[in-house]
Amino acid sequence: MRILVVDDEPDVRDVIRRLLLPHAERIDVADSAEAAGALTLQDYDVMLVDIILPGLDGATFIRRLGERGVRARIVAMSGGGPGCSGLQALASAEALGADAILFKPFGVERLLDAVLEGTPTAV
């Protein structure tokens, strides 16, 4: 599985990357939607996207992924921010096509459930 993590907080990107590493063939990280948009987005099976980002916000990024026909599983993440609760941010992401939502802070089990849902398990 190829995973992209888009979050402006370095510690969050690093923790998610380390937790998902045993389940992934490749994990790339981006600190903004603009940086993520410069990648070949068709290469990913799963994208974890923070909704509250500087510059282009995660909800707009998710909408653009849909417009571009990107078929990756989208997991939206948020703990909220100035003027926007995490629940509001995640509701907008879900309306735009996110496959799963994670309210920050989230636990390891919830992260794995959101990312691995629908993927074949090894026997």
Image (cartoon, rainbow, N blue to C red):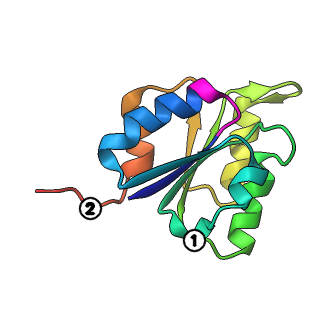
User: Percent position (x, y) of residue 36?
Assistant: 69, 54
- 10 Å neighbourhood of mark 2: few (<14), some, or many (≥20)? few
Residue 30 in sight: yes
What's the amino acid at mark 1?
Gln
Label 2 and label 1: CA atoms lie apart by 20 Å
Up the image or down, 101 lies above or below 47; here it is above
Image side of residue 84 versus residue 16, left or right = right
* Magenta portion: prevailing SS class: loop
Residue 120's tag is 2
User: Percent position (x, y) of residue 37?
Assistant: 73, 60
Tell me the element at label 2.
Answer: loop
Residue 104 in sight: no
Name the outermost residue toward the left.
Answer: 123
Labels 2 and 1: the sequence-earlier one: 1
What's the amino acid at mark 2?
Pro
User: Percent position (x, y) of residue 43?
Assistant: 52, 68
Q: In the image, is residue 56 part of the stretch drawn in magenta?
A: no
CB within 8 Å, label 2 to label 1: no
Instruction: Give the residue displayed 50% in from the left and 27% down from the top.
Output: 106
Q: Quadrant of residue 107?
A: top left
User: Percent position (x, y) of residue 21?
Assistant: 36, 42
In the foreground, 59 or 35: 35
Q: In the image, is residue 9 part of the stretch drawn in magenta?
A: yes
Q: Which residue is mark 1?
A: 42
Q: Quadrant of residue 76?
A: top right
Give the magenta range. Answer: 7-11
